[in-house]
Image: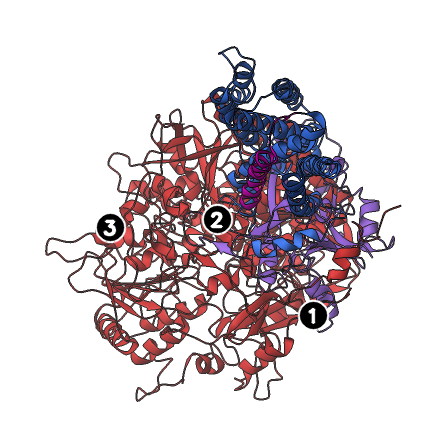
Chain colours: A red, B blue, C purple
Amino acid sequence: MSALPEFEDHAKQTVKTTTCYMCACRCGIKVTLEGNEIRFIQGNPKHPVNKGVLCAKGNAGIMKQKSPAKLTQPLVRKAGTERGDGEFEPISWDKALTLLTERLRKIRATDPKRLAFFTGRDQMQALTGFWASQFGTINWAAHGGFCSVNMAAGGLYMTGQSFWEFGDPDWDNAKYFMLWGVAEDHASNPIKIGLEKLKRRGAKFVAINPVRTGYQAIADEWIGIRPGTDGLLALSFAHVLLKNEQFDWEFLTNYTNSTQLVIHAPGTSKHGLLLRDEEGELQIWNQATDSVASWNASSHDDEIKPALFGEFLTPGAKGGITDGVADCTQVKTVMTHLAEKYLSEEYAPENVAERVGVDAETIERLALEMAHVAFKETITIETPWTDWTGRRHERFIGRPVAMHAMRGISAHSNGFQTCRSIHLFQVMLGAVDCPGSHLAKPPFPKHVAPPIKPAKAMAPDTPLSSPPLGFPMSPEDLVVDANGEPLRIDKAYSWEAPIANHGMMHMVINNAVKGDPYPIDTLILFMANMSWNSSMNTAEVQDMLREKDEHGDYKLPFIVTSDAFHSEMVNYSDLVLPDTTYLERFDTISMLDRPISEPHAACDSIRQPVIDLDRDVRPWQEVLVDIGTRLKFPALTDADGGAKFADYKDFITNWEKAPGIGFLAGWRGKDGDEHMVGAPNPDQWQAYQDNDCFFEHKLPPEQRYYRFANKDYLEWAKSVGFNAHAGPITIELYSEVLQKFRLAGQGLYDGPQPNNDTDRQRLIDYFDPMPDWYVPLEEQRIDNEKYKFHAVNQRPMHMYHSWDSQNAWLRQIMAQNYMYINRQRGLSLGIDDLDWIWVESHHGKIRCQAKLMEGCNPDTVWTWNAIGKQSGAWGLSDKAPESTKGFLMNHLISELLPSKDGERGLTNSDPVTGQAAWYDLKVDIYKAEEGETGVYPEFKHIKRLPDMAESPTVLRYHTHTPVNLERSMEDALTRGHLPTGDKP
Amino acid sequence: MHPALSVIFFTVTAGAGYGVLFLLGISRLTGLTPEASPDQATVMGLVGLALVTAGLISSTFHLANPKNAWRSFVRFRTSWLSREAVFAVLFYPLCLIWLACDWFMGNTALTVVLGLLTALFCVVILVCTGMIYAQLKTIRQWHTALTPVNFVLLGLLLGALILGFMLASQNLPLSRLVSVALGLVIISALAKVIYFYWIGQPAGPTINTALGFTRATVRLLDVGNSSDTFHNKEFGYQVDKVKLIWLRAISLTLMAVLPLLLISGVFGPVGSIALLIAVLSAYAGVFVERWLFFAEARHVVNLYHGFQRT
Amino acid sequence: MKLGLVIDLDTCVGCHACAVACKQWNTSGTTGPLTDYDPYGENPAGVWFNRIRSYEVDDYPNNKTVNTPMSCMHCDDAACVTVCPTGASYKREEDGIVLVDQSKCMGCNLCAWACPYGARELDEDSGVMKKCTLCVDRIYDEALPVEERQPACVMTCPTSARFFGDFDDPNSEVSTLVRERSGYAMMPEVGYNPVNKYLPPRQRPKAPTIEKKEAATGQTLIGKWMKRQKDAFNDFGKGAR
């Protein structure tokens, strides 16, 4: 019989590389095509992110491309119909863009902030942010406010790096790995690749997560923590480390602000600030002379011996030693403050055990295990390097304890401080950016914090002078008016959320409809499903989108949505600008953004169209450049108003942020032989296309660790525009920035202060300059006897972070979600598998089906997020389980905290960063009455869009006639039953 | 297992046909139908053959791709289904020749031999059909010698009753057939009771052995498919326990108790009416029995779908 | 040759990547298309060669979640082949791959009944049985780069939980893994001698801890540290510079 099958005809195939767009990983893919049909999508083995592997979503790209929910043409809401009724009519691109441009031109010429532009699963924030700046509106942000900001800010205000796109565990060297938080999150393939490496090397993997699914399944130890208490657990680890004298004295002294001196002057504006000399130099205590010295000098001068611990009296403001105590300032080292705080019995394992849901012995053991790995299993990499002071080190010393934190950490109202708490004990172990620990990914680490201030000034027809989003360092940087009232529509950078570095997209609709702080004219949304799973309180948000004023006009006058698919948000739009899929366009994943870098390489990438467009849709990138040119943005037009750039590709090639620095870092310079910095290269796109659509600058070995203090790295990072200067990135265990806000709350700050007690008290309570833990805000305000359960959600790995259509293959894996409950707990409530139950929060109730499981904290219920769909959206039939049985938890979550008398409505967000507190939710659950079945609440069926084809009832996708492998009749007739013939 | 009507009808009806033909085949030798004329014998044989044919036609409805049904003769060497198919096809010429001989020549040695050969084929085919199920190690309720025994016994039982009815309706003496039928009723009911007892005993793989985790409770968390797949539809069939007991009782009553009473003369003389009722009752009883045979069978793949045991 | 897969339950996170990669490759592969029924409706289902299930072993709080991808085991004693009446199902002599010749199958389902592992799925649209081919149209295709001559599921697996190779070669990666990691067969008692093997979750030895110090109050400790830095500040702070 024939040994080899006949193979498919490769002569009819072409292979193109590009970049996946299913989630934040942005893996490299190889697409095999037959004509304009996709034969196969696979991981690109050369790609730095995924190294050839691909997840379920990436593998289902064919069905994304084939989705019947793809938008096909621009649409406008039919005149005379109500918003949300789903009555649209086609409009030409030309008319659509003219309509929009005219509207925007008026806004820009009068009051630019009346345009709010918010983006969802945006992978080009550098472009959309640039566009908003050029337009001149501060009302721009991506979805980070309801996703990542706690993670980002927690790290960037402390270590200059963070989890997610900011850094990765050192998968190759870590011996102990702790994974925090629910949700298989940020990132997907790199974490999976890394976990396997860890397991293969025999490293220990501990999962701190109320739920044991996915990654946690393969953990060596699972700690089923109570949601919202991770920070307390981290601080208890810190307590145990201190009690057992396990902290990296040298690391703390050299690389952190532990030796800096905190002023003790209660009741004054200096209290809690760091001691500086007259030049503003931070001070330390020199034991050699028993006097203060500058931190900077102490770093260079071996004769200066900084004290890590101690409380001292320093001379008065004028300097010079005096005898009188009255002339002196009382100071204490940061480390002494930290030690005093965390040695407190409040953080002792036995005192946190019950609240955290982990027994005291386990907490202590885990901390001591990590200490053992950090200090007794230290590793070295024999590469000499130079620190920022010029001292040569013979090797990199590694404390091989690595961490990663997922959404369960960030999506709480105490998430910012929780992230800081995790970083705190990483730093105590010396396990930051050293071999085996958590490694930054270029352009990180950055200085604490990056020197960009959020824009607040606006003028008609004028670009902003700085980006809409930045890093406030003191109350002066808030985006508030003279009365302390918010200037941004989302109230980011106001007293209610001072360090809202990613904006607060989840508040935009609510605020705009209330006209608080002011009404707006136009809301542009890109890839954001704000009328469904991306909003808290979905049902009421849909009502808000329909709300009219006394003249019968919509309170939110004009909504523009750009999306590739028929989402629930499309249904609530006035103008729909259809986007392409990721396989049909050019795109950049820029170093100016959060690029695809790996710890040891700065990388960026592009997308290129691999298939031809078959619909009247345009890439949003192209549309933005087009509208910007029509509106005569200074960066896009020359003095006489002519277009500077022919199109998006031309713009990316030739626009420079600073001389030599543009969106793409690779193959710059006239001849394409300069990287990172160089003049525009007209053939840059082609160079990327020729190089599998990515650029990778590998860091030389001596630049790979201790980058916060690594001279060569810091100088390089400055030279390529990552950092403003080449000075050290000092890890700020004690945050003077937070203390300044706290002083403002206390009425002591020498500068702006809140104008009301609510904001004052929040600053006092939550702006602890040292990592802290407090009860999540919703939990502080509700009846915890009634709402006994924490309710959290996560996305299944095969749908993680994917924003678009219910994929025909992936929905076969999961088309309905359930509310999971700990088995014993569920049975004790009389709830069994598949029972219909009510889930009730302080805000609302839903009915859904229960499932019992073992791997769930007994005080927690959870579900898979965003499985539930509104009937008719995403090309699904009205009988699709996503709408008849699937549900959202969002209905239970209010965008405002439970109200208190005499207090304005406060955002249900982290009080520091404004991160949406999705996971603070607490609920009661009980069995539905006999006969009460089906999902509640129910939503109206969404109408099919004009000219949209019916979804197929049978799919037989294939790109060529199958090459059948024939068995010969002779073989079939003569063979015994096994290949070896008749068995002996 | 999903109880497919096409297969149930096939095994019950063809089984009855083979039963009729088996008894006819041995009748010349054993004198079961001493007074049937060649015409009458042939007609009764054709009735048996018609039942077989109806069953076989029904069986093709179970095939998803019947155009390839002819290929089922290929793997005679290993496949019981292939063997069944081959014997079933060979059976036709043999049976027709025998019936023709009987009709033309009457009771000759050749007829007797051909009759016996036909009878042998009937049993072989019934055994083959039984073995299609009995060979499957994946379904412990089938993987037993009781399966072919049961197929043979119930085929013969239905055959005996149908033959009895045909004799009685032509006013031919029933002779020893009643005793044979009585014996078959008792033995097959007994075999079925033994079978029910036997499948009630816990045995075979469990979710633990299926997955290789034998030291603790194993529970399914997520089956990985949202809607029913081929496997759920084919293997996931489950009957309610109470319903099951009722159905077993109904089946035994219809196929054994009622026919037993009818042919043992409890309700009066054993005539064509009594036999017709007995036939209909037994046929319905065996139909339920065969439905249960599938419905009660629990394929081991269900262990992967969360069953603790089969 | 005896080709098959080894699946590492110690690293499988249950992400379904292998299942979808398989679906994607094979829908245009030798036995494609793999039909999907009601893809946008009430009961979305279709033909898959590889399915991933998750189980929980033991009770809370000792529970462990285990993800198990399952596809054809290419059994040595493949009853699916012996029961097949048409000869459509066969086990290749040269490499042991169990295949279904799509042109010969009559769709009687008996092979699926004979399979304990749920590896065979009927394509209700074309009426023939389909199953894992071990990507026979990849592994021998010399037009593909050498490193891509592997089943699609193996190539895509993000946790490298899948290995493909020759079990007849005692030095192959798959044989070595089975030997060293106590690879086992699922449901061996059925007696099919599955070729595919599973590597059980690793039992990691207990991690050592730093020896616990005697309890001391915070103030005592800070006092001690202050004294230490004073006494011997040369040893601390800048020791490694």
Q: Main secondary structure of the magenta part?
A: helix
Q: Which residue is mark 1?
A: A6
Q: Nearer the viewer, mark 1 or mark 3?
A: 1
Disc 2 and disc 3 on one polypeptide chain: yes
- Residue B65 placement, left or right of A830: right
Residue at the spot x=22%, y=71% of the render? A103
Q: Chain of mark 2?
A: A
- Residue C2 placement, left or right of A635: right
Q: Which residue is mark 3?
A: A544
Q: Please say if C194 is above or below B113.
A: below
- Contact between labelled residues 3 and 1, with CB atoms less than 8 Å apart: no
Q: Chain of mark 3?
A: A
Q: Quadrant of the C terminus of chain B?
A: top right
Q: CA distance from mark 1 to mark 3?
A: 61 Å
Q: Secondary structure at mark 1?
A: loop
Q: CA distance from mark 2 to mark 1?
A: 76 Å
Disc 2 and disc 1 on one polypeptide chain: yes
**Residue B42: in magenta span:** yes
Q: Please say if A555 is above or below B271.
A: below
Disc on res. A273: 2
State which tag comes first along the sequence, 2 or 3. 2
User: Residue at the front extreme?
Assistant: B105
Please give the count of numbered marks on the rendered protein: 3
Q: Nearer the viewer, residue A786 or A967?
A: A967
Q: Please say if C92 is above or below A865.
A: below
Q: Quadrant of the N terminus of chain B?
A: top right
Amino acid at circle 3: Met
Image location of residue C180, percent across then percent down: 83, 45
User: Residue at the left extreme?
Assistant: A551
